[in-house]
Amino acid sequence: MTQTTPRNPPRLAERSTAAYVLRLVPLILLTEVVALELSLVYPALQHMAAEFRTESIGWTLTVVSLVGVVAQPLLGKVADGHGKKRVIVYAAGVFAVGSLVCALAPNFPVFLVGRAAQGVAMVIAPAAYGLIRDVFPVRVVPVAMGAITTGIGFSVILGPVVGGALVQSFGFRAIFWFCLLYAVVLAPLVSATFPESGVRLRRPVDVAGGLLFGCGAAGVLLAVGQGSKWGWGSGRLLAVAVGACVLLALFVVCELRAADPLIDLRLLTGPALRWTLLAALGGSVAIGGVALTLPQLVQTPENTGFGLGMAPIGVAVFLVPQGLLSAAGGPLGGLLARRRAPRTGLLIALGCLATAATLLSVLHTRVWHILLAALFMGIGFGFFFVSVSNLVVEAVPATHTGVGAGMMGVANNLGNATGVTVLGAVLAQHVLDTPGDEVLYGEAGYVSAFLVAAGFAAMALLVAAFMRHGRTPATGGVGAVPRENGRAEATS
């Protein structure tokens, strides 16, 4: 039998700010486990490639994203029906097992199995957004959402430093022992200190729909991410792209016929969620593209006439201020969403991202040029994620928060992959003729790439500017209610 929850489910009683912080800290740290482990892994990629004697080390990152886009909507639905804290703790357990497999892996295939298990943890963030919405007083929800972004900012700062130190002192496997310990310590803390959500949507989980959507989205992500390597006209790429489109089309057909669909397509295609996800996609393209391009620019030798010639650790000079501003921007964006409107924060975020990319296209030959752009990127990054998460919470009823936030995660993943691929393809058209095997790109390539990133951010800004959703102060999700028949309906 279908069971629905009341429109105003029980929440925690009003407490002091310190009490909310104590509850949030373990959840924030656990929520950022994927962002942290990715930033830990980046400094170790060359060491992994040498250990496993493979030229396909990029799959170390790709497999996490592929599993993530399958897991987020499907397990998000499970969280909506069976408990968000429960899914968070179980996903952390799978992540811990994956970390152990990676630490002990005797060969590359086994190592990729461990990485795939770690990708399941991508569902933790969507489930955490829903858990915060369900149990905190409504006035706290927008700011608590911003606190999640604070963790992302610190991950950007600490990850490369900790990862580099572990690899240099103990080898790359130390990263995964660290990840194992991280999950084993934090998951029980979250379980003990954070209450379970009382919001449930007791319906059968549409596993077929979830697999169709997840595999279709993973196919799109794979095609976008591997297109330049496989060749845009190759048979393998066309087969993956066509297969992904077929799976997504079957998903739509099945969802329209299903009595209990993974997500009500009227909610997904409604203006509130539709335009929010589209703006998130465009912003993620800019974020992913600049994240790929900027480190390569600052490491370009000075004798090219435009590079800064920095060592890889020198990139931290720009990541630290960017991460600090991102950490500060999260709570500030949450306050802005509560007092003004979440769309306002998104406009600020996309404006800053577009400004940063435009500045880099014009000013990129001095340290202060890059620092100036990093400041705008940090503000944009911090405001972006808290604004999008609050917009999603305002767009869907409490019984659909997990799957709604999972769709946001899919949009962000696809946007990042598209940014990396598109800007990488732009750079590839401007390879410099250099001795040896070193690959360097010309200044015109960087200028063009940054302008493309700015263009995507500007288009997302245009979407947000005309979006009617999110123009009033955030309610903590109480403005989005289910219809009387149990179907979802978002209020704009």
Image: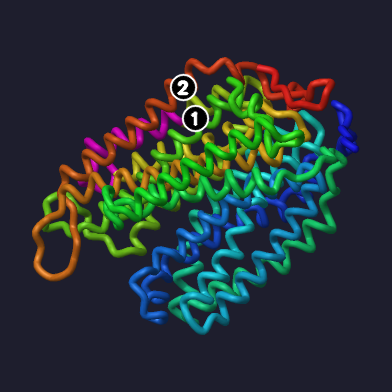
Horizontally, residue 8 falls left or right of residue 293, namely right
The percent coordinates of residue 142 (x first, y second) are 68, 32
Instruction: Identify the residue shown where x is 46% and y is 61%.
Output: 61
Instruction: Identify the residue shown where x is 51% and y is 54%.
Output: 65
Instruction: Tell me, yes or no, whether the two marked residues, 2 and 1, touch with CB atoms within 8 Å.
Output: yes
Residue at label 1? 278
Above or below, comparing residue 96 to residue 238 in the picture? below
From which residue to which does the magenta span run? Answer: 350-369
Instruction: Specify the label residue 91 is tagged with.
Output: none
Residue most toward the bottom? 106
Magenta span: chief secondary structure: helix
Asked whether residue 332 is in view, the answer is no
Above or below, comparing residue 466 to residue 29 in the picture? above
The percent coordinates of residue 2 (x first, y second) are 87, 35
Element type at marker 1? helix
Which three-letter amino acid code belongs to the residue tagged 2? Val
Element type at marker 2? helix
